[in-house]
Every structure is written in C-alpha cells, then in structure tokens.
Image: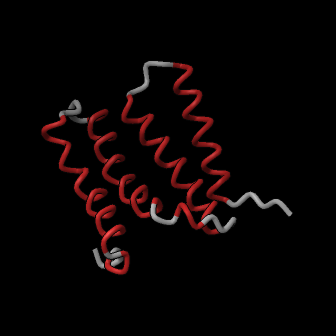
Amino acid sequence: MLVLPIPLIASLMLAALLVFALLRGGVQKLFLALLAAAAAQGVIVSLTQYYGVTALLPAQPAVAALIPPLAWVTFRSTAVKAFDWRRDLWHGAAPALAIAASLAASNALDII
C-alpha cells in the first residue's frame, strides 16, 4: 500500500509554496533556497526512512546541516541587514564540516 509520510507531505507543501513564490516573482533568492532545502530534506528523509532508498543517506546530514545557517542568513538578511558574502559566508562552515565528517568518519558525525 502506498504511504505518504508526514515529511513527504510537508515537502509537497513547501514545493508548492516554492512554485507559487517563483511564479509571483520579487521573492528573495535566499528565501527560495531555504524553501528548496527544506523541501529536499523532507523528500530525503521520506525516501530513506520510509521507502528504503539508502543511496541518499550521505546527503541527509549535509542538507540537515545546511538548513539552520541558511535560515539564519535568510531571516537576518530580510529583517536586519542586507546579505553580504564576506560577512555571511562563514555560516557555510557547519555544512562543510558535516559533509567532510560524513565522508571521512561517519561515526564521528553525531559528535561533531
């Protein structure tokens, strides 16, 4: 029987919101990236945990580590200061560290 897990339903809603934002125009690109990353994370979680697609397991920690800094930079750039690569690029260190840890020592990923 076909099952639609809750993360997949949330991803479908986020994808619909992303499409509406793209069609409307005038939406900040960082916000679109945040919507896409959150939708992708839900799809990855659904496919790995509910449907047994193990090929996506290495991508799961990388996308999960990307969402919080992306959300912070997105919300900060819309409410406080405009996005500046030199100031905000260091927020990408956490996802880069998660990707390196998942490739080099996946057992140490939880500790990091």
Identify the image quadrant of residue 28. top left
Q: Which residue lies at the image location 49% right of the left edge and 49% below the top edge?
A: 38
Tell whether 5 sits left or right of 65.
Answer: right
> Compared to 105, does 65 lie above or below?
above
Using the rendered view, name the quadrant where residue 19 is placed.
top right
Q: Nearer the viewer, residue 107 or 9?
A: 107
Horizontal side of residue 70 vs 42, given as left or right = left
Relative vertical location of residue 83 with respect to residue 95 in this rendering, above or below: above
Q: What is the tally of numbered marks visible in this picture? A: 0
**Residue found 49% across the figure and 41% down from its top:** 36
**Rendered location of residue 101, percent (x, y):** 30, 69
Q: Quadrant of the N terminus?
A: bottom right
The residue that appears at 30% across and 71% down in the rendered structure is 104
Asked whether 6 or 85 is in front, the reply is 85
x and y, in percent, of residue 55 in the image? 55, 63
Which quarter of the rendered picture does the C terminus lie within? bottom left
